[in-house]
Image (spheres, rainbow, N blue to C red):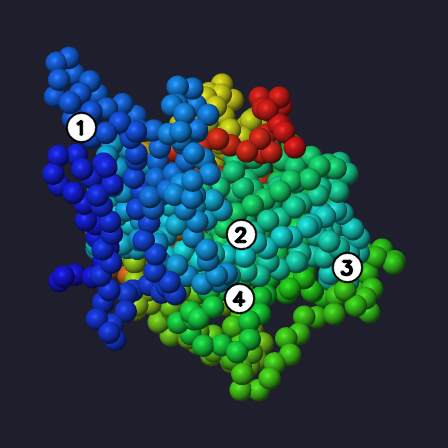
Amino acid sequence: MSCPGTYLYHAHYGMQREAGLYGSIRVSLPDGESEPFWYDYDKSIILADWYHASTYEQAAGLSSIPFVFVGEPQSILIQGKGRFDCNAPGIQAGLCNATNPECTPYALTVIPRKTYRLRIGSLTALSALSFEIEGHNMTVVEVDGHYVEPFVVKNLFIYSGCLFTVPLVEGRVRHYKWEVKYEFKSPDCYKKLAITINGRTPGPSIIAQQGDTIIVELKNSLITENVAVHWHGIRQVGTPWFDGSEGVTQCPILPGDSFVYKFVVDRPGTYLYHAHYGMQREAGLYGSIRVSLPDGESEPFWYDYDRSIILADWYHASTYEQAAGLSSIPFVWVREPQSILIQGKGRFDCNAPGIQAGLCNATNPECTPYALTVIPQKIYRLRIGSLTALSALSFEIEGHNMTVVEADAIFNYYPNHPRRNPPTVPPPGPRWNDTEPRLAQSIAMKSHKGYIHPPPQTSDRVIVMLNTQNLINGNVRWSINNISYNLPHTPYLIALKYNLTHAFDPSPPPDGYNFVNYDIYSVAKNVNATTSTGIYRLKFNTTVDIILQNANIRTPNNSETHPWHLHGHDFWVVGYGKGKFDKTKDPKNYNLVNPIRKNTVAVHPYGWTALRFRADNPGVWAFHCHIESHFFMGMGVVFEEGIEKLGSLPTSIMGCGDTKGFHRP
């Protein structure tokens, strides 16, 4: 045969295929060559349906007058094995024997941590099937004997005659038991209430391998406060209900209650987790996730040791005080943080004027500066993540270059030139406030050769989002196209799945704004700005362009940087620009050859950023500014796609709004 791949053979006379005359063909590459994906073992699985009537009876019915259709099959076979109910009424004695070894269900015995190439083909006579492997996502790498751009599915919809190859790792189940509660901590030497996980902030790191199932049993011991945890960067293919977005995908976890998150980490890389309720992330509820490749595989770069470093900012005011200020009249801004934390450690000046005696102790071991002890000549992989509530940081390791090889769990992020900064403290001034270097760095980053996944060359829908700061009913709010986002009482995922259409505003937000007349350099007037719970409904499996446009805030001559994060997806960053986006000219300059893929991206002051993504992950997904106070003030939207493709929702995510009667522990 001229091409390697997966093929089938079957009868082509009358209806004999239906009677069992079929099988599989596997064609490998010549010795010394290898497929573009790794596997340890190779298995074929043929799906078929099975009728108890003979093909003679069926053929007679199909050609008779009156016409007699074959009807539904009596069984579905996996590799020639199925199970019919021998106790069904009307079964003739002696014809059905449930103990017959010929109908023992097919089982594939696997070795943990090994990768199995599953060649899945359908030779059904009638049925279109939905194939799923419980607890696993499937990455399709071959279709009908041809290698394809890998794509991930939870359910494989497979029609007769179709073939798919899925490399699958039998992962471990990694079980974590967490208790979330308030404790007095001094991460920067100043004593205040922090939210901890098992007594720690940052919380415990989740360390796993690709294909592992993560189970986190979380008990909320905050006494008077709800909680929810988002798994930042995990796409939750097939498990959108465990994304952890309160009001979007789940009801919050009530005080005293426990909740179990269960999901598969289907890709290697660096991820984060953090609170997604109110402003709890800022109080210390966050941590890191490290997912390595399966045994025998390696990243496209070498290292001896692996370390995670989370950067955060730290306020001495409680989240209650800050939330009250943000939602009060007159408005009270959170201002600059008191400290910057590196892996939960910082240093506040305990001699600063106005510090109450006993609250700040510079000798407290909790605020001992973070130090990474290294072995000379060894290479350390530093997974550096930021979960600041407000701050955009400039991170430097004195006397070292830094070569970026991964961002947002994707090995395609490669600046043109790593730089070495002078080993001296730079003078105060423009270096820290000038946004030009940030924009230049963003534009310079392209996909690394060998990890280029070009985006679709055209889009099906374009949504331009104008970020403005508005006064709505006396409150300062952030708005997108004059709409400030509010969470509904009933989470969108549940409301949409069970057709609770009254649970949120059915009117979608606008796809754009007045391009011609809007002046992004002036203070927004926007007297018609309002709040809404409306969402964007995206057609499943279409390509969507999002253009994020920054403008002046309510203070003259002031525009801000906003890091936007998309749940459930990666996107291609196809363009950046200064000034107002020109919908006619600017798309002609998009990078559609080697753009980076990310899940979080910055929009620079008085500038725009263009994103492109596929709406191919059934569920409901938040898209919002990752600055804690901005999201609290309404700077976000929600996308729905393919909700009809989801099965039943777990009742554990319910219990609020219109779902109070649905909840089951």
Find the residue positioned furthest to the front: 94
Residue 342 screen position, x and y as percent:
63, 65
Residue at label 1? Answer: 56
Q: Are marks 2 and 1 in contact (CB under 8 Å)?
A: no
Q: What kind of element bears circle 3? A: loop
Inter-mark Cα distance, 4 to 2: 22 Å
Circle on res. 213 = 2
Cα separation between marks 3 and 1: 81 Å
Identify the mark nearer the N-term, 3 or 1: 1
Mark 1 crowd level (few <14, some 14–19, many ≥20, 10 Å Cα) = few
**Alpha-carbon span between mark 2 and mark 3:** 34 Å
The image quarter in which residue 188 lies: bottom right
Q: Which residue is mark 3?
A: 186
Determine the secondary structure under disc 2. Answer: strand
Q: Which of pointers 4 and 3 lies earlier in the amino acid sequence?
A: 3
Which quadrant is home to the N terminus?
Answer: bottom left
The outermost residue toward the right is 357
**Marks 2, 1: nearer the viewer:** 1
State the mark number for residue 252.
none
Provide the residue designation for mark 4.
383
Q: Secondary structure at mark 4?
A: strand
**Residue sitting at x 66%, y 74%:** 371
Q: Earlier in the sequence, mark 4 or mark 2?
A: 2
